Amino acid sequence: QVQLVESGGGLVQSGESLALTCKAPRMIFSVFSPKTMAWYRQAPGKERELIASITADRTTDYAESVKGRFTISRDNSNKKVYLQMSSLKPEDTATYYCNDKNNALRWGQGTHVTVSS
């Protein structure tokens, strides 16, 4: 069963940076590399939202709320997707998940980010 594992979350202050990693250790390269991968987040009491995506050819797209502050990237050989977050705000506090944007896999546990003011 495909597993997605997110890591890198933590507690930071407003304005600081954090880097998240998502890995798919059981997915083979030929399956992972063509996928459009995405990062999502879910804040307490809110629905999960798509915040960034990256295609196989590394075309990226961002939600307005994170554009200019977050950067998504991927390492196909290691089956990883990254989310570099800078200028963090308290409203970025959420649990962050990654997944296949077009064909959702089983959701991982996510990694929690708390931004204090």
Image: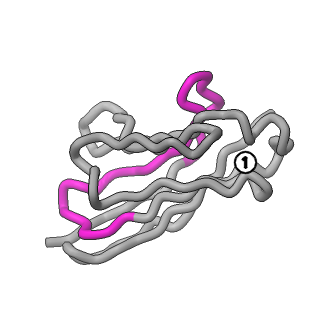
Residue 22: horizontal and vertical position, in percent? 61, 54
Q: How many labels sit on residues? A: 1
Up the image or down, 105 lies above or below 26; here it is: above
Residue where numbered disc 1 is placed: 24
Q: What is the x, y in percent for residue 23? A: 68, 53
Amino acid on which disc 1 is placed: Ala
Does the segment drawn in magenta span residue 81? Answer: no
Determine the residue positioned at 79% across, 51% down: 25
Q: Residue at x 84, y 38 (%)?
A: 30
- Indicate whether 59 appears above or below 70: above
Where is residue 111? Give x, y as percent.
Answer: 49, 56
Image quarter in which the N terminus is found: top right
Q: Residue at x 37, y 64 (%)?
A: 85
Quadrant location of the C terminus in the rendered image: bottom left
Q: Is residue 46 above or below residue 103?
A: below
The answer to which quarter of the image holds residue 93 is bottom left
Looking at the rendering, the stretch of residues picked out in magenta corresponds to 85-109
Q: Secondary structure at mark 1?
A: loop
Residue 56 located left or right of residue 19: right
| Residue lying furthest top | 103
Image location of residue 8, percent across then percent down? 52, 67
On screen, 62 above or below 72?
Answer: above
